[in-house]
Each structure stands twice: as C-alpha cells, then as structure tokens.
Image (spheres, rainbow, N blue to C red):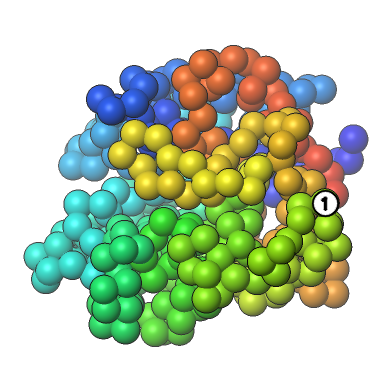
Amino acid sequence: MSNNNYPKLHNATWPGIVGKGPDSEPTIALDNMLKMTAAAEVDGVKFDGVDIGLFDPHYDLDTSDDGVKRLADKVAAYDLEIGTLVAPIWGGPAMGTKEQRTEFVEMVRKSCEVGQKLRALGIRPNGVVRIDSASSVADWAKDPKANSKLIAETFREACDVAADFGERLAAEGEICWGGMQSMDYMLETFEMVDRKNIGFQADMSHTTLYLLGYNAPEHRVLPKDFNWDDRETFLAGLKKITDKLRPWTIDFHVAQNDGTVHGTGSHDKTGRHCQATDPNGKLDIANDAGYWLRDGSGELTKAFKHICWDGCMFSNDIMTQPKTWNDILAAMIKVREQHGWNEA
C-alpha cells in the first residue's frame, strides 16, 4: 500500500435522502450515514470525511450559527471532516420565472454562508458548493437557446453571490439536468456563465452516460453499435470527454456504472450508481479515474484535495451492509494509490 495521503477519501451523506421518501424507501438519518462511514475500514485505512447535502431531513438550511456548530461537532465526533456541500436548489428551475431564479440564488447564498462558517470552524479544509440546473431535459428542449441563456444568467448570479463567501460552485454533469445533459451542452453553459468560480463536478457514473448520448443523441461520443467488450474504443471516448471537461473539473465522484440509466422515488433516470464490486460494472474504477485525475501527459492535476463516493439510489438493504462501505473504501484506496500524492 502506498504512503499517499491525498486526495482525501470522502463518502457522500445525501444517498440517505436522494431517491428515498414516501414514493420509495424511508430516508436514512444523517447520524446513521456518519456512523456507517466512520465504521468502514480496510487494512487500517478509513474514510477521511464526508460531503453533505444541506437539505431536509439531514439539515435545516435556515438554522442558526449554533446549528452550524452542532453539525460541525456531530461530524467531528466521528473523526471526519466536511468537504463539498450540496445546495438545495430544486425549489425552482434555474431557467424558471424571476421568482424561481431568485429562490435558486438564495439557496446558493445560504449554502455558501454555511460553507464559510464551517471553514471558520476548521471542520471544512476543502470542497466546493454543488449545483445543477434543477431543470428537466424535456422542459429545456422546448426552447434550448432561451433556456440555456436563463440557466447561464442564474448561474452567473449564483457565482457572484458565492464569491462574496469565498466559495466556488461545481455544476454536476448529469444526463437528467436540462442544459447539462452532454459534454457539449455543459461546455456551452460554462462559456456563457463566464465566471472564474464555477467548474465541473465529474461523476464517473454520470459522465459515462455522456459517451452514449442519453438525453442528447446528437452529442453521442461512442458509435451506435458500440460493444462494451471494446475497451479500446471506450477509453478513446473517455479520453475525448475528459480532455474537454478536465480543465473545468473542480470536484470528483468515484463511482461504478453498468451502462444503464436508473431512477428511484421522484429522481429522474440518470447514470446508475452500481456497487463498487458489481460484476456488471463497465468501469475499471482505479484506471479510469486517472483520466480525470491526470492531465493529457499523465501528470497529476491535483485540482482538488478530496474525492468522494456517491452511492445515490442504492437500496437501503445495500446501504446498511458494512461490506458495501468496505468495498467502496477499498476501491477508493486503489484510486489514491494510483493517482494520489503525499503532503506533510
């Protein structure tokens, strides 16, 4: 095992909420997500921290300073740090009415304020604030040009607000978000936003679906007759999207994908998050992560100091098994062994 201690290894807490609820399975409490994360261990290595979704029932974004301190103390009690925060911006689409767009920016403001306070408390040494367009692909497609312009305007306002708190925003590349459902649309959005404190959140599962053109067949990268046994063609496609999106990437999710879409509860279908050891997984996790973590010449970018596992829409049965988290941690350790570095 290497001596690399960076990037730090984080687990996401929001899979205890996303895809859960009255129309699916019960949510999993934040305390339980923290407990399961802290309990995972592989050859003496444990998770370093968590990335947190700032939404009910895990967190009340309108809580007082004491509430922020309670969150910090809760996470610290498990010997974990906090990294990236997810802003709850789904009350109205970024391409919505003036009132909806104002609400979107306000959720970003509140999230950035929490992030700044957590940094001041010393519990959050790195990380960004994650956003998306909160807009369906179908609604966006009714007027792509106008809707993308609105999304960019909303993101630009959110960036200006985030800058006041010293925060950067990471837009999640996922096929279910209008104006963000392909590499090309994502790049167009970034160019229109034109702010230095916005970047890309790459998720190994979601970005794999970029290659197949789900929800954006006009931007499909792999051939229509692509066979998953053709590893060489897959890697050529992966190189194409990572070369384009890597310069924008400021946050990264390690994940596995079986080449299909999936959705539970009220969550739209998107790239399926598989277990790390899923026999149907199409990714060589440690190897393929290198396309995001290393530049075109093979040098480490060190563009972010932690990486995170996102197990969105795992069933509660899977999530409550200790083996699940040990397998995930083992996969992330391999990523750090191959693409990490050491800092004093």
- How many C-alpha atoms fall within 10 Å of the one at disc 1: few (<14), some, or many (≥20)? few
Instruction: Let me know if residue 73 appears in the view.
Output: no
Give the left or right position of residue 330, taking residue 325 as reference: right
Q: In this view, does 79 lie above or below 267?
A: above
Q: Where is residue 219 in the image (x, y as percent from the top left)?
A: 55, 74
Q: Position of residue 249 (x, y in %)?
A: 59, 66
Give the left or right position of residue 158, taking residue 208 as reference: left
Q: Looking at the image, which residue is at 71% across and 74% down?
A: 240
The quadrant of the rendering that contains the N terminus is top right
Q: In this view of the protein, which residue sits in the foreground, 229 or 255? A: 229
Q: In this view, does 213 lie above or below 260?
A: below
Q: Looking at the image, which residue is at 54% across and 35% down?
A: 311
Q: Looking at the image, which residue is at 79% across and 46% down?
A: 284
Q: Residue furthest left?
A: 99
Instruction: Let me know if residue 298 appears in the view.
Output: yes
Label 1 SS: loop
Q: Is residue 82 above or below residue 139?
A: above
Question: What kind of residue is marked 1?
Answer: Asp
Q: Residue furthest right?
A: 1
Q: Position of residue 12 (x, y in %)?
A: 51, 37
Residue matched to label 1 = 229
The quadrant where residue 189 appears: bottom left
Q: Where is residue 50 in the image (x, y as percent from the top left)?
A: 52, 37
Give the left or right position of residue 344, taking residue 187 as reference: right
Q: Looking at the image, which residue is at 81% across and 65% down?
A: 233
Q: Is residue 12 above or below residue 169?
A: above
